[in-house]
Image (cartoon, rainbow, N blue to C red):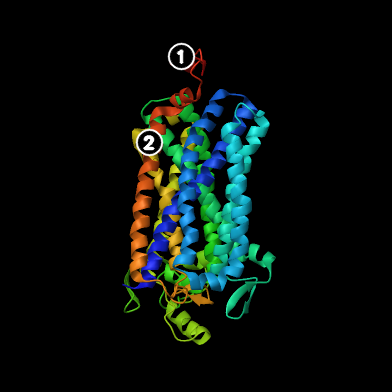
Amino acid sequence: MDPVMLARIQFASTTIFHFIFVPLSIGLAFLIAIMETMYVVKGQEVYKKMAKFWGKLFLINFAVGVVTGILQEFQFGMNWSDYSRFVGDVFGAPLAIEALLAFFLESTFIGLWIFGWDRLSKKVHLLSIWLVSFGTLMSAFWILAANSFMQRPVGFEMNNGRAEMNDFLALITNGQLLVEFPHTIFGALATGAFLVAGVSAYKLMKKQDLDFFKKSFHIAIVVGLTTSILVAVFGHQQAQYLVDTQPMKMAAAESLWETSDDPAAWTVIASIDPEKQENKMELKIPYLLSFLSYSKFSGEVIGMKELQAQYEQQYGPGDYIPPVRTTFWSFRIMVAAGSVMILLGLYGAWLMLRKKVEHAGRWFLRLMLFGISLPFIANSSGWIMTEIGRQPWTVFGLITTENSISPNVSAGSILFSLITFTAIYAVLAAVMAYLFIKVIKKGPYAAEEEDRPASDPFNKEGYHAVS
C-alpha cells in the first residue's frame, strides 16, 4: 500500500471530522451571544433560557472539538515530518498564536460564562460570551492564515532548502486569507444558525415549547439567511481570486481541459474522462464562467492542458493536474447545498415576517430538519475542493505532497493509526449524537430544572407558569 495515499486519507478523515465541530462552535457561540444580548437589553427570561439551552449544545460540541483537534497537531510530526521541517518556521507563529492567545481566550471566558450566571453582573457575563465568540473567530483566523500560505505562499524566503518567514505582516494580509477567512466564517455562522433553526422547526412540528422555539427560530433564520448570502458573495470573490493565483484549481473545478472560448460557458454537469483528458457529455450555460471569473460576460479561461505545459516549463517535468472529478463535483455539491440553504432561509424569513412560523406546513419544518446537514455538506465539500484542487502541491509551487511525507513512516503504521483514529472518532460521534439528542428531547425547561437547587420551592408546574 502507498504510504503517501494512506497518509492523505488519514489527514483527510481527521480533518473533515474535526471540521464538523469547528464551524458549529463558531456559529453557536455567536448565536448564544445574540440571545444573551437580547436578554440583557429586553430583560425577558426566555432569552436567558435560550442562551442556557443552546449553550449546553455548544459546550458538548466544544469539548469534542478540542479532542479531535489535538490529533491534527500530532499528524504533522507523525506522517508529514518533511513538510513540517520545510514550513515550520512559517507555520510556527500563527499556530502558536492560535494556541496561546485565541484558544486560551476561549477557554478562560467559557469558564466564566458557565459558572458566572449568578456571580457576575449581566453585562460582564454578556461580555464573557462575546469574548468566547471573538476567540473562536481568532482561532479560525490564525489557522486560516497558515492554510492560506499553503494556497499562496507569501512573506517568506528560502534558506537551506526551508521556507523561513521574513514578513509577518504579509502573512496576515495574504490576499488568499482576505477572501478565505470571511467565506469560512460566514459558513460557520450559517452552520450554527441552521442547527438552531432545524431543531426549533422539529420542536415546532411536535408542538413543544412553542414560544421558546419560535423565538429561537426567528433569530436563527435571520442569521442563517444573511450568512448564507454572504457565503455566496465571498465565495464568488474567492473563485475570482483563484483565476489569478491558482488557475489550475479553477480549471479543474470546471473540468476545463482546453482553453475556453471568449466568452466562456459554465459547465453545470459533465461526464469526465481523466485518462483521455476530455468530457464526453456536458451541460453548459453560455457566458456564465466568464462572469464568475471576471464579473463581466467576456473573457477566456485557461484550460488544464495549457496550464500543464506552463507548469512543466516553470517547475520541471511532472503531472500538475489535480484529481479532476473530485474537484469538479465537490465544487458543485458545495454550490448546490449553499443554494438550498438560501432558499430555505428566504422562505423561513417570509414566514417569520408573516408571523406564521408555528403554522408552517410540516413539509417545510421537515425540510428545515434536513437543512441541519446542508452547512456540513457545504463546508466539507468546499474544503475537499480547496485541498484536492491544490494537488500535487502541499505548498503551492514550493513542495509537493510526495516530498512532504515522513521518510521513515511505514504503510502498516499509518494504516494502524488510521483504523484506530477512525474507531475513536466513531465513538466520539456516537457520544456526541447521544448527548445532543438527550438535551434536545428534554427541552429548555427540563434542562433548567436540572440546574435549580434541590431546595427550590417551585415545582415543575410552577416553574412553567412563571416562565
- Residue 413, percent across and down? 36, 66
Give above or below for 363 relative to 322.
above
- Looking at the image, which residue is at 61% across and 68% down? 90
Dot 2: few (<14), some (14–19), or many (≥20) neighbours within 10 Å?
Answer: few
Mark 1 falls on what kind of element?
Answer: loop
Give above or below for 390 relative to 381.
below
Label pair 1/2, CB-CB below 8 angstroms = no
Q: Which residue is mark 2?
A: 437
- Tag on residue 124? none
Q: Mark 1 and mark 2: span between their CA atoms? A: 25 Å
Instruction: Specify whether residue 253 is in view.
Output: yes
**Amino acid under label 1?**
Asn
Q: Quadrant of residue 389?
A: bottom left
- Residue 57, percent across and down? 47, 38
- Looking at the image, which residue is at 46% across and 34% down? 351
Left or right: where does residue 271 sit relative to residue 400?
left
Q: Which residue is mark 1?
A: 459
- Residue 446, percent across and down? 43, 24
